[in-house]
Image (cartoon, rainbow, N blue to C red):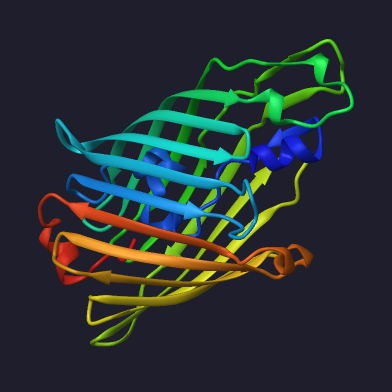
């Protein structure tokens, strides 16, 4: 995360915020997802990472998406806030999606996004060999993104680049002093399978690639019982294992949480990471999704 990268090294390429419950908040990483549920939806999520470590990252996100003008267009608004030690980064993103319906069951949604990122770093809290060479650019950085989301009421596959442009947040008289936001590539997918009339099973994956960092992959398996209670587990390749749970309180309100535990050497130094989210639909989704919930 941001501050830990700064403290570890002044030559550093930022990783975007990490979510275990990304499948409930897909609009944050893929603009093509916007409006795909057929109803106006608000999602709020909080993540506390590496609990027990002073200054560890804390992330909040808020996402609203809905149909726009007609059934074939979607509009989304996302706000995310990432605080880690002396660094605070806030992003504001607007998504637009247009859906191509190949049949009653299969849809390709193509999305674009525009974003503004705001960075605030208290440089006085950083310990460096040459602190006088660092000047934080506590300003605004614009960006654009694209995404494609292909789905039915039973499966989905998406590819996205939410930040196409590389951004630099530090000016420096020293070539070793830099903080860059690099382009991230996301590939997601999942399928919903009926195990019996009351149990559904959804295996899913997320892969993330960025220059200068190992490929990141999340593999998850969730079970939905009686269209009400979700329980599952996830594995982040060579990094962490997770437990996930969610409960459909009403037809409109879903609440859930996740707990991660690092399986590398860093796991012994922290108490894991915790997420909680709340998802609210303003009205019932299209009836075909109620009979066969998409579960994503």
Choose between 99 and 74: the one closer to the eye.
74
| Quarter of the N terminus within the rendering | top right
Q: Is residue 230 left or right of residue 74?
A: right
Image position, residue 106 (x, y; %):
30, 55
Q: Is residue 233 visible?
A: yes
> With respect to residue 149, does 254 lie above or below?
below
Q: How many marks?
A: 0
Quadrant in which residue 268 is drawn: bottom right
Choose between 121 and 66: the one closer to the eye.
121
Image position, residue 224 (x, y; %):
32, 77
The furthest residue to the top: 173
Q: Is residue 211 visible?
A: no
Q: Is residue 81 left or right of residue 34?
A: right
What residue sits 14% from the left and 67% below the top? 250
Q: Is residue 66 left or right of residue 79?
A: left
| Quarter of the C terminus within the rendering | bottom left
Image position, residue 9 (x, y; %):
81, 36
What residue sits 70% from the left and 24% below the top? 124
What residue sits 11% from the left and 57% below the top? 284
Image position, residue 292 (x, y; %):
21, 70
The furthest residue to the right: 129
> With respect to residue 25, does 167 lie above or below?
above
Quadrant in which residue 182 is drawn: top right
> With respect to residue 117, does 240 lie above or below?
below
Quadrant in which residue 95 is drawn: top left
> With respect to residue 167, does 105 lie above or below?
below
Choose between 50 and 159: the one closer to the eye.
50
């Amino acid at each position: 995360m941001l501050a830990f990268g700064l403290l570890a090294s002044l030559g550093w390429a930022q990783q975007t915020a990490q979510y275990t419950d990304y499948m409930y908040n897909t609009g944050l990483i893929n603009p093509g997802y916007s409006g795909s549920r057929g109803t106006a939806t608000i999602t709020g999520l909080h993540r506390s990472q590496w609990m027990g470590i002073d200054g560890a990252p804390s992330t909040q996100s808020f996402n609203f998406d809905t149909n726009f003008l007609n059934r074939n267009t979607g509009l989304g608004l996302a706000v995310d806030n990432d605080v880690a030690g002396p660094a605070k980064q806030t992003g504001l993103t607007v998504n637009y999606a247009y859906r191509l319906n190949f049949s009653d069951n299969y849809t390709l949604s193509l999305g674009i996004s525009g974003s503004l990122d705001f960075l605030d770093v208290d440089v006085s809290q950083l310990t460096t060999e040459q602190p006088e060479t660092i000047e934080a650019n506590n300003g605004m950085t614009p960006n654009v993104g694209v995404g494609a989301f292909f789905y039915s009421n039973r499966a989905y596959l998406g590819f996205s680049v939410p930040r196409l442009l590389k951004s630099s947040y530090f000016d420096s008289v020293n070539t070793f002093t830099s903080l860059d936001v690099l382009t991230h590539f996301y590939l997601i997918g999942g399928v919903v399978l009926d195990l019996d009339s009351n149990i559904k099973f959804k295996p899913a994956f997320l892969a993330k690639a960025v220059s200068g960092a190992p490929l990141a992959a999340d593999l998850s398996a969730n079970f939905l019982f009686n269209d009400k209670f979700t329980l599952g587990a996830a594995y982040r390749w060579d990094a962490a294992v997770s437990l996930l749970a969610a409960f459909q309180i009403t037809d409109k309100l879903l609440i859930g949480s996740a707990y991660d535990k690092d399986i590398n050497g860093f796991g012994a130094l922290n108490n894991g990471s915790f997420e909680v989210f709340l998802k609210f639909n303003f009205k019932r989704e299209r009836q075909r999704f109620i009979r066969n919930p998409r579960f994503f």
